[in-house]
Image (cartoon, rainbow, N blue to C red):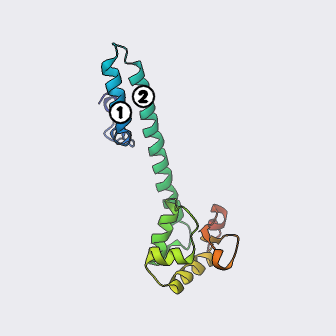
């Protein structure tokens, strides 16, 4: 409450309560230790300020992701993606783990292998996806670099 009042703003872009919820067990451990200790609340204040810092970091990461998606969406040629492509590109922009190939695309997007391959080839041709090293069954794709995306048609 003191933080909210000190900002003199009705808007906050970070969530201390959300971060405490993530770190709930540590929060309760720290409260218990503080209650059982003497009057020195320094360890709790240190934990809280570090938690606040982690909340700022989480917000910064979320905003970077949102802004990255917004910039990506404004790149020329981005408006004509089909629904599967938009959905899968969002997954990639959110940090898809592992190698993405047409089989995974087909399974995730619930489409045929041929449809997934057509989606891939279209995105590669536009410079949105880049083909990884290897070929044949080990062919994988990832988001192209920002330089490649800026040259899209």
Q: Quadrant of residue 22?
A: top left
- Image coordinates for residue 148, horizontal then vertical, percent: 66, 67
CB contact under 8 Å: marks 1 and 2? yes
141 or 126: which is nearer to us? 141
Q: Which residue is mark 1?
A: 27
Q: Which tag, 1 or 2, sits closer to the chain's start?
A: 1
Quadrant where the N terminus is found in the figure = top left
- In the image, what residue occupies the spot 41% across and 19% down? 42
Residue depicted at 46% across the width and 34% down the height: 53
Q: Secondary structure at mark 1?
A: helix
Instruction: Report helix, strand or loop for mark 2.
Output: helix
Res. 5 mark:
none
Residue matched to label 2? 47
Residue 23 drawn at (x, y percent)? 38, 39
Work out whether 40 lies above or below 93. Answer: above
- Looking at the image, residue 79 lies above or below residue 145: below
Which residue is found at the position 69% from the left and 77% from the top? 135
Quarter of the image where the C terminus is located: bottom right
Percent of width and height locating residue 49: 43, 29
Tell which of 28 and 90 is nearer to you.
28
Q: Identify the image quadrant of residue 150.
A: bottom right
Kindly report the distance in space between the C-alpha atoms of the residues bearing marks 1 and 2. 8 Å
**Front residue (pair 127, 137):** 137
- Mark 1, Cα crowd under 10 Å, few <14 / some 14-19 / many 20+, is some
Left/right of residue 70 with respect to residue 28 in the rendered view: right
| Residue 86, percent from left and from top | 47, 72
């Amino acid at each position: 409450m003191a933080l909210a009042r000190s900002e003199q703003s009705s808007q906050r872009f970070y969530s201390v309560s959300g971060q405490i919820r993530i770190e709930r067990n540590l929060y309760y451990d720290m409260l218990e230790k503080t209650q059982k200790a003497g009057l020195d609340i320094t360890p709790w204040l240190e934990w809280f300020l570090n938690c606040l810092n982690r909340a700022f970091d989480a917000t910064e990461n979320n905003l970077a992701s949102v802004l990255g998606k917004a910039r990506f969406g404004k790149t020329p040629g981005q408006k004509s993606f089909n629904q599967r492509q938009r959905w899968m590109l969002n997954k990639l922009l959110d940090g898809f783990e592992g190698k993405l190939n047409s089989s995974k695309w087909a399974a995730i997007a619930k489409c045929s292998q041929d449809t997934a391959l057509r989606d891939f080839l279209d995105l590669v041709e536009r410079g949105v996806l880049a083909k990884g090293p290897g070929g044949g069954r080990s062919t994988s794709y990832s988001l192209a670099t920002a330089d490649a995306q800026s040259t899209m048609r």
